[in-house]
Amino acid sequence: MVVRLIEECQRLLREVQDAPSVAPDSARLRQFRSQQPLRRDVFERGLEAIEWTAEERGLAGLGELSGLPWRLPMDAFFEAWVETVAERYCTLRGGTLQTGREDETIVPLSWDPPYTGSQSSLRPDFVIDKGQQTIILDAKYKSHWEELDVKNWHQTRQSLRDQHRTDLLQVLAYANLADMSHVTACLIYPCHHSTWRSLAERDRLAHRAELGAGSRTVELVLAAVSMETSPDEAVRALEAAISE
């Protein structure tokens, strides 16, 4: 979607490339409104965006109390992309999606006595219920996949191995929350599009391990996702990674 918006902006700029560039001021915008009644809300919102930009009230300036914010943490953006893919997956392949963003996946921890506890709950990013299979997705905006693709485990830096172990323990703790006979716990990492294509050609977009937990089977999956693919293409890759 971001790429499409940029392309649309570039197309609009080409449409007006022969027109002189004039920075609008408040008086000119008021005059335009008085002479040209705006019949559609979209034009009013467009003029408002121009005002925000010209007056540096948040849209393109430093203001924080008005206008639209430009800043979005990349880990939140990546998690939103994984949510988009998960929603599309459930629409096409079936299943019910619950998200941590909407507090649908929270499981409280009961400490005894309560004041001695630390973390109060567990909250997986996404949980997909498919009847006999529960799929837990945890989005991690880290460079682990890129580094593990270049080097083997023993050649990677110690800090990466420590962080990766923490990720594994976290998603396995989430897997213990499900009571289905088959649980898939998936850590999803971003990677560059060139890396993603190379992995797809070599059928290495996902790595799997299986753990026995009594009568339950827990499948651990490490999956790579590129934010430069189409949602449907990402869904096909996700399906291949988490299919029962």
Image (cartoon, grey):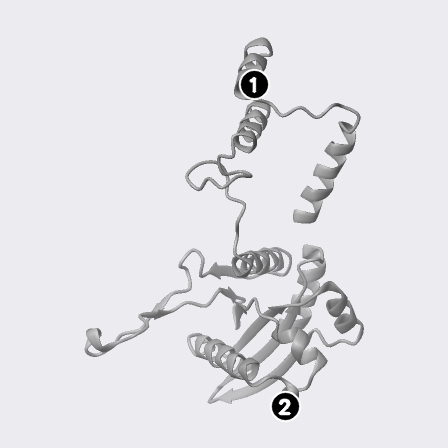
Q: Residue 163: x percent and y percent?
A: 51, 79
Residue 71 lies, with reference to residue 234, above or below; the image says: above
Comparing 215 with 28, the one in front is 28
Q: Which residue is mark 2?
A: 154
Q: Nearer the viewer, residue 123 or 6?
A: 6
Residue depicted at x 71% and y 79%? 150
Q: Is 137 rendered above or below residue 69?
A: below
Position of residue 152 in the picture relative to residue 175 (left or right):
right
Q: Is residue 89 visible?
A: yes
Against 78, residue 223 (above or below) is below
Q: Which residue is mark 1?
A: 29
> Callout 2: few (<14), some (14-19), or many (20+) C-alpha neighbours within 10 Å?
few
Counting residues from the N terminus, which is met first, the one under dot 1 or under dot 2? 1
Residue found 46% across the figure and 39% down from its top: 63
x then y, percent, for residue 202: 79, 76
Foreground label between 1 and 2: 1
Q: Secondary structure at mark 2?
A: helix
Quadrant of the rendered structure where residue 151 is?
bottom right
Which amino acid type is marked by label 2?
His
Q: Secondary structure at mark 1?
A: helix
Q: For the residues marked 1 and 2, what is the alpha-carbon distance in whole angstroms? A: 63 Å
Identify residue type, mark 1: Leu
Label drawn at residue 180:
none
Task: Tell me the residue at 66%/80% (across/down).
Answer: 148
**Relative to residue 184, is residue 114 drawn left or right?**
left
